[in-house]
Image: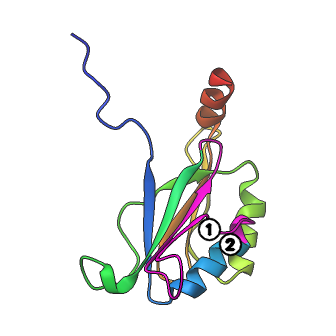
Amino acid sequence: MATPNTLRGLATLTFYATDLAAARDWYAQFLGTEAYFAFPKTGNPAYVEFRIGDYQHELGIIDAQYAPRPLGEAGGPIAYWHVDDIEAVYTRLLSLGATEFEPITQRANSNFVTASVIDPFGNLLGIMYNPHYLEIVSAIQ
């Protein structure tokens, strides 16, 4: 019997922000699209969500008052989003006020390149040029 995939794909990545409206606006500017969902629908939201990328993955931002622990220094796991031009996207993130966490880094003797920033709200955002991602997208289209 084959072992089923336990992790089938990115469903939602969530960030926290002490100023959710500012985070919503910053990500709308960076992503070039408005959040498609907010809760509640009127007034100050507690949660906003963007659909982005080839598979319309969800990027959610939650008001920090609902974080399970107090927010601290950036660290921990990094979710990397594939980008076609890592230098351009990295430069754009920095120009919008993000700060470097990890510079653009060529991984070993491969075509994989990563970088990460801390957004203005303290969240780690990873970007990556990933040829494997492009192979998968190409194979299923």
The answer to whether one can see residue 120 in this image is no
**Quadrant of the image for the N terminus?**
top left
Describe the element under mark 2 as helix, strand or loop.
Answer: helix
Residue 125 against residue 58 in the figure, above or below = below
Quick check: is 106 in the magenta stretch?
no
Q: Which residues fall within the magenta stretch?
A: 30-55
Please name the amino acid that badge 1 sits on.
Ala
The answer to whether one can see residue 107 in this image is yes
| Residue name at image x 38 percent, y 72 percent | 75
Residue 99 against residue 2 in the figure, above or below = below
Q: Can you give x and y, in whole percent of width and height, for residue 131 in the image?
A: 64, 35
On screen, residue 1 versus residue 30, left or right, reads left
Quarter location, residue 76: bottom left
Q: Which residue is the extreme one toward the left?
A: 1
Closer mark to the observer between disc 2 and disc 1 = 1
Q: Are marks 2 and 1 in contact (CB under 8 Å)?
A: yes
Quarter location, residue 68: bottom left
Number of numbered markers:
2
Whichever of labels 2 and 1 marks the residue nearer the N terminus, that label is 2
Residue 107 against residue 2 in the figure, above or below = below
Q: Which residue is mark 1?
A: 35
| Viewer-side residue, 107 vs 120 | 120
Describe the element under mark 1 as helix, strand or loop.
Answer: loop
Residue 118 against residue 6 in the figure, above or below = below
| Viewer-side residue, 11 vs 104 | 11
Please name the amino acid that badge 2 sits on.
Ala
Q: Which residue is mark 2?
A: 28
Q: Can you give x and y, in whole percent of width and height, for residue 72 in the image?
A: 34, 85
Q: Give how far apart the Cα atoms at labels 2 and 1 are.
A: 7 Å
| Residue name at image x 78 percent, y 62 percent | 88
